[in-house]
Amino acid sequence: MGRTGTSWASPEALWEERVQRGAHPVAYPAIRGLRGRAVVRVPRVGVVVNDAAVAREVLLDTERFSKVGPGSPSDLWTPVLGPSVLLNMEGAEHAAMRRALGPIFSPRAVRELVDAGREPGGPLDELALRLDKGETVDLAATVAAQAGAVICGLVGLPPTDAAVRESMAAAQAVTGMVRLHRRRLTAAQARHARGVLEGLTAPARMAYRAGDEGTVPGRMRALGLSEREAMGAVGAFVLTGTETIQSFVPRLLAIAHDTGWMDRLLGVPGPGAATGPAAANGGGDSDLRRRMVEEGLRVTVPTPAMLRSVVAGAEVGGERVRPGDRVVIATVNCCRAEGGFDPDRAISAGVRHLWFGAGPHFCLGMPLAMAQVNAVLDALAPVAAAGGTPVVGRRRVARGVLVPAYRELAITLART
Ligand code: HEM
């Protein structure tokens, strides 16, 4: 039976704290220190929002708060990715590009991308086989390989081991340069990041030019995106969609282990699978997995902050802001204000899905993210159904990364 409503001094809370501090030893404790105050102006950082309702107001008010302008994501990413990559666009152009990209995230397209990690001999297939043989498996490495296989699918590369490793390393080399106190990359960093991404998107460019609709870049061309837009979108997907998954899935499993929820996490069939061996183990409520995953997202908050630039004078939770000010939405504080991991507690409407953002920039890749999470849980479910419980052993946290994560999370199977 899992403990519920866990306090922040419990094992999962302590490990989460280490994961967060490993990535951001200075910024994380500083931002957490601001919780409890809805809005705080912090010199050199910006106006920090710690309250979900105020955060939503900012995210939905595109007249006053923008992803383009001083201190916003455009300052960081435009020099690297170019001017039209969704996360640095606003208004009608942004909406048109999101519409154009919609079919890339249709259920079928997402399934095809995720299947790359599920093939025989692929990372997820290996995961179950090796656990079953009694081996210890590093879940962080497995999920990185799975996420890497998905990027290969996105950029049009065959997911060989080397290609997967290089893609992941390239993405991390770029995002690792970003820090909360740094409003833009230095010229040398931007040059380096451009070089890394150009290498990664070279196959995407070829696939776009060949117009092969079996590839994502080819499909983008058929959907009417220019080459520049398509390459920008590919770059944005690589930057936003790899480390978040690599971060979240091992943390979810670690929390399930630490709180005693593992069997139930793996005993519930995924969406659309109401019967089968997984249902037999722990079975029942098919909604439970979704709730556990959402609760895991709420407490881990893989994207811990969102940035906006103020474009017109406004009030943020009573604090006057002027054009040019930076608003830092401390999503991690907004979401964790509800308490520790407890899938039995309903998430309040104001917080629900805030970990994926809100308003016009709401995470475009959410269906792909959820499919990747479910693919790992589906790979482990038969193992659990056969009487095995994955048990977490050695863990190491990642340092110098943008998205807090485990660098290693060893799991073995305990048989009942
Ligand atoms: C657990 C995993 C993920 C989390 C927690 C997450 C979170 C977020 C958040 C919070 C935003 C909004 C940022 C803002 O408004 O400033 C966002 C945007 C975005 N995400 Fe995700 N994301 C995840 C996975 C993915 C994946 C797998 C992809 C796929 C490629 C992806 C692609 C994007 C894109 C393209 C945007 C920009 C959308 C826009 O600006 O219109 N994300 N994500």
Image (spheres, rainbow, N blue to C red):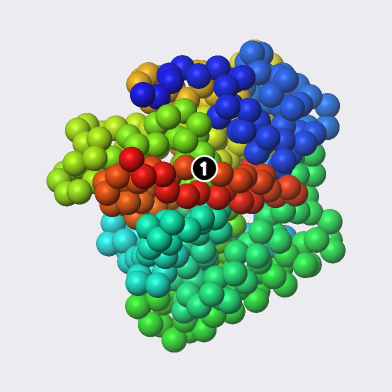
Q: Is residue 412 above or below residue 127?
A: above
* SS at mark 1 in the image: strand
Residue lying at the far left in this picture: please name it. 275
Is residue 285 visible in the rendered image? The answer is: yes
Q: How far across and down, in percent of the image, does residue 39 sit?
A: 66, 18
Q: How far across and down, in percent of the image, does residue 287 sit?
A: 26, 33
The image quadrant of residue 199 is bottom right
Image position of 317 (left or right of 108): right
Closest to the observer, 127 or 112: 127
Q: Amino acid at mark 1?
A: Val
In which quadrant of the rendered image does the C terminus lie? top left
Is residue 326 visible in the rendered image? The answer is: no
The image quadrant of residue 256 is top left
In which quadrant of the rendered image does the N terminus lie? top left
Image position of 24 (left or right of 163): right
Q: Is residue 14 above or below residue 208?
A: above
Residue drawn where x is 79% and y is 39% of the image: 181
Closest to the observer, 279 or 20: 279
Q: Which residue is mark 1?
A: 392
Q: How far across and down, in percent of the image, does residue 321 sit?
A: 71, 24
Residue drawn where x is 84% and y is 63% of the image: 188
Number of labelled discs?
1
Closest to the observer, 310 or 134: 134
